[in-house]
Structure formats: C-alpha cells, structure tokens
Amino acid sequence: MSEIALNKSGTEFRRGMQAGISIGIGYLPVALTFGLLAKTTGLSIGETLLMSLAVYAGAAQYISLSLLALGTGTFEIVLTTFIVNIRHFLMSASLNEKSEDDEPIIKAAYAFGITDETFSVAAVKEGTVSAGYMFGLNLIAYLSWVIFSGIGHAVGASLPQTFQESMSVALYAMFVGLLVPSMKKGVKVVFLAVLAAIFNTVFTITNALSTGWAIVTATLLSAVLVELIVMMKERRTKDAE
C-alpha cells in the first residue's frame, strides 16, 4: 500500500472516530444499566464482558438477561436474539451500496460493528464510506459499550444485596422504555406488541410451551399475522383504486 493510501486511510479512521464519539457517549447510560442488571441477574463480570464483546446488541442483550432470569434454554435465547437482530442483514446490505470497494473479509470485519446508531451515522455521511471510516466509527462505539458494561457490573457489585435484587424490576422498565417510542410511531407496532403479549400469555397459562419457546413462538406468530393483515389491507386499497 502506498504512503498516500496509508495517509488517506488514517485520516478516514480519525474522522470515523470523531463521528463515533457522540455514539459512545450515548451508549454510556444504557451500557452501565446493562452491566448493573447483568450483575443482579447473576452473571459474572467475565460473562457480562463476553456477552458485550460477542453479541454487541443492546436490545438482544437485555432480552437475553430476561430469558436467563426465567431459566430459558440456550437454543431459545440464541433464536430470539437472531430474530431481534435480523434487521442487521438489511442494514448491512444497504450500507454495502454506499461503501467503497474492498475485500469481502474487510467488509465482513466492520459489518460486525454495525448497530442502529453507527448505521445511521454512516448512512447520512456525504459520499461513500471507506473501511477506515467504518473501523474508526465502530471502534469508539464498541469500546464504549464493552467498557461501560464492565463498569456497570462493578458498580452493581458494590450495591447492597437487597438493592441488587430489587433491580430486576428495572429490566422490565427498560423494555417499556424501548417499546413505547416505537409504539408512538405507528399503530402497526401497537398491534404487534398486543398480539405478542396475548399469545405469550396463552402459551404460558396453558403450559403449552416452555417460557423460552412461548416468547419465540409468540414473537413469530404476531409478526406473521401483522404482516399478513398489512398486506391484505394494501391489496384492498389497490383494488379499490
């Protein structure tokens, strides 16, 4: 690689890091809370850091904590995480159209660090995005999430046992906080949440499925039904025109 190319790559990397600072700051309270809840759920600091290092997905990690607290099996947790994060396929495909030509292995490396926030920053950037820019952008966000997860766990370990146990309620409050803004954006999300809650309640009360499978099945069924309803509504609208 020529010296000019190296300088350009270094410049793009620094620009990416600068763009990622705001994301890193935004991750601070969420990552701290995750670390704190991970401690109260029973995870060690090593397990907490490993989850943040390997999964690196806020909503999926919070859901995993909830499922772990309910004693859900590993396969159900992995499947639920996959369903929650399936949107990353779309984000990666979209960003691929905006990124500069690079080796597939390089694109795969920085695709791991794509989150809703890093995708948004990269998507609105003028022109194309380089590998150097993406690595710089992702690095700051990634380090922020992992480091503050560990700090949150350490802070949780210093709290009184009674307070740690009561923090389990905060996990459900976090889910409400994640859900309500989405529900405000459209009726579709409201129907999805209500249907999933109904299905999960029925499966749980009747003991038809285990806790983990009840959540996974309720999520899939509600998503399919809502999409079918939306498709039928759109078809009727077109027929009426």
Image: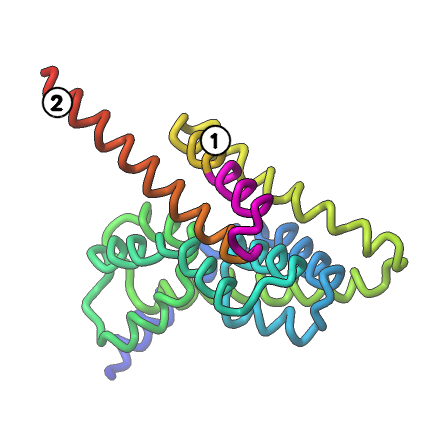
Q: Residue 215's spot in the image, x, y percent?
A: 51, 51
Compared to residue 225, the image places residue 108 above or below, namely: below
**Residue drawn at the location 31% of the way across and 71% of the way down:** 108
Between residue 180 and residue 198, name the one nearer to us. Answer: 198
Q: Nearer the viewer, residue 33 or 180?
A: 180
Name the spot of residue 158 as percent of width and height, x first. Answer: 85, 63
What span is colored magenta in the figure? 196-211
Q: Which residue is mark 2?
A: 238
Q: Is residue 124 visible?
A: yes
Numbered label attached to residue 115: none
Asked if 196 appears above or below 161 in the picture, the reply is above
**x, y (%) of residue 83?**
40, 55
Question: Could you tell whether 153 is left or right of 22 in the image?
Answer: right
- For label 2, the SS is helix
Is 47 displayed left or right of 81 in the figure?
right
Residue at 37% x, 53% y: name it: 119
Q: Magenta: predominant secondary structure element? A: helix
Q: Position of residue 186 (x, y in %)?
A: 40, 27
Where's the C terminus, which quadrant? top left
Displayed quadrant of residue 16? bottom left
Q: Which label's residue is closer to the chain start, 2 or 1? A: 1
Mark number, residue 183: 1
Choose between 94 and 44: the one closer to the eye: 44
Which of the pair 196/116 is nearer the observer? Answer: 196
Q: Amino acid at mark 1?
A: Met
Q: Is residue 197 magenta?
A: yes
Q: Residues within 10 Å of mark 2 (few under 14, many from 20)?
A: few
